[in-house]
Image: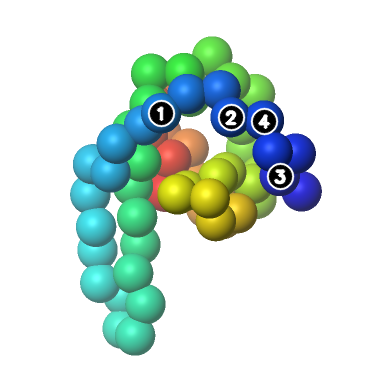
Amino acid sequence: MFTGIIKGIGEISDLRRLGGSMEIAVRWAGFRDADLSSGDSVSIDGACLSAERVEGDVVW
């Protein structure tokens, strides 16, 4: 569950079309130090989305 605490601002680093949906990659240096795992919630432009995978400073 997203708690409403915003810790930083990232940028969209990649978009991929997957059939009828999209996969978004967000880059933020703070992801490297965050205790973030697949399935955790991330706020993207105010919408609560689930992280599918974490790759260094990028979350998909």
Residue 33 on image: x %, y %: 54, 14
- Say what amino acid the circle numbered 3 marks: Phe
Task: Give the Cα distance between marks 4 and 3.
Answer: 8 Å
Residue placed under numbered mark 3 in the picture: 2
Viewer-side label of 4, 3: 4
Asked if one can make out residue 27 in the rendered structure from this viewpoint, the answer is: yes
Q: Do the residues labelled 3 and 2 touch (CB within 8 Å)?
A: no
- Say what amino acid the circle numbered 1 marks: Ile
Quadrant assignment, res 34: top right
Q: Residue at x 67, y 30 (%)?
A: 5
Task: Give the Cα distance between marks 4 and 2.
Answer: 4 Å
Q: Are marks 3 and 1 in contact (CB under 8 Å)?
A: no
Residue 21 on image: x %, y %: 37, 77
Q: Is mark 4 on a helix, strand or loop?
A: loop
Task: Give the Cα distance between marks 1 and 4.
Answer: 12 Å
Q: Is mark 2 on a helix, strand or loop?
A: loop
Locate residue 55 relative to residue 39 in the image: left or right. left
Q: Do the residues labelled 1 and 2 touch (CB within 8 Å)?
A: yes
Quadrant assignment, res 57: top left
Q: Residue at x 43, y 40 (%)?
A: 59
Residue placed under numbered mark 4 in the picture: 5
Q: Which mark is residue 9?
A: 1
Q: Do the residues labelled 4 and 2 touch (CB within 8 Å)?
A: yes
Task: Give the Cα distance between marks 3 and 2.
Answer: 10 Å
Residue at the far bottom in the pictured view: 20
- Say what amino acid the circle numbered 4 marks: Ile
Q: Residues within 10 Å of mark 1 (few under 14, many from 20)?
A: few
Residue placed under numbered mark 2 in the picture: 6
Asked if one can make out residue 38 in the rendered structure from this viewpoint, the answer is: no
Quadrant assignment, res 13: top left
